[in-house]
Amino acid sequence: MLFDSPDAFIHSSRRAITVFGMAGVGKTRLSNLLRKNRWFHYSVDYRIGTRHMGEFIVDNFKAEAMKVPFLAQLLRSDSIYISSNITFDNLDPLSSYLGTPGNAKLGGLPLAEYQRRQEQHRVAEISALLDVPHFIDRAKTLYGYSDFIADTGGSLIEVIDHADPEDPVVKALTENTLLLYIRGTDKDAAELVRRFRQSPKPMYYRPAFLLQKWAEFKHIEGILEDDDVDPAKFGAWGFEALLHDRLPRYQALADNFGYTIEASDLATVRDGDEFIDLVASAIEKRMR
């Protein structure tokens, strides 16, 4: 959805935007801000963790509870109820299910199990992204919202071919929304790595990239067995490698099908009108 002029976007009767970029550049902050200005906020990660992976997450909770005899007895008799309290701002249930590969004594998962859950996430993310057109219509017909923002996870770029207009997800998003890349800086990237060490987020690796980095990490650390990998250490190291691998692909997606704004400019936006002006400036810049 490319516009002929900034005015065409500004005066559009309905707006639908998909924001993407690395975690922490302001996508969710923006979405929460716009929600107060009568924009419908569609969180892809929330949709993944509820509709498309909710059962996996809760079953994992139950499997852990079944290891405790007292809780196992209550579960078998339907005396207790276990659910996931995932929210737009708290994705910990999804993060804990995806986990990190490595030493089980340190909270890690066997690599094969980690790969199985990664594939579940890949399928779920594609499904959640393909749900966007349905939710655009739902936002209007059910709630009366004309403006819509899809808040995507950092792994959007991993489940599409950013150069192919016929890729199913790219096609669905570009035909129904304006693609907007929120571009961070090297300083932002360093801060994201620091935050990840404190509070890991859901991570998805392309299968070949995961195996490449897994082998590279073990070589660097002088580790022979998968079970000897420190999951927290690999998680932070892998996140940083994945982050830098994604950046040029984010930009390529924006160059091919959308627009780019700077995270520093977005940080100054205070309401919906200022955001619309910022997007209009991006449209004008692309036209030049």
Image: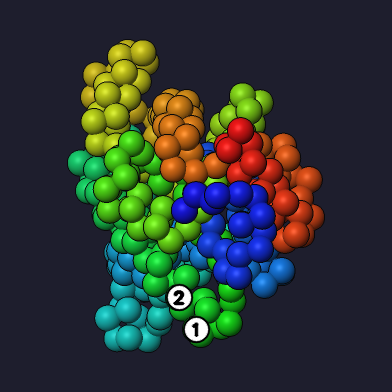
85 sits to left or right of 131: right
Which residue does the image show at 63% across and 36% down from the upper left? 285
* For residue 88, above or below residue 186: below
Which residue does the image show at 30% across and 14% down from the upper left? 219
- Give the residue type at disc 2: Asp
In the rendered image, the residue lying farthest to the front is 4
* For residue 253, above or below residue 16: above
The residues bearing labels 2 and 1 have C-alpha atoms spaced at a distance of 6 Å
Residue 161 percent coordinates (x, y): 30, 40
* For residue 240, above or below residue 35: above
Nearest the viewer among 178 and 75 is: 178
Nearest the viewer among 282 and 26 is: 282
252 sits to left or right of 143: left
Residue 104 percent coordinates (x, y): 32, 41
| Disc 2 + disc 1, Cβ < 8 Å | yes
Q: Which residue is mark 1?
A: 141
Which quarter of the image is occupied by the C terminus?
top right
Specify the color scheme. Answer: rainbow
Which residue does the image show at 51% across and 53% down from the upper left? 178
Q: Secondary structure at mark 1?
A: helix
Q: In the image, which disc is placed on residue 137?
A: 2
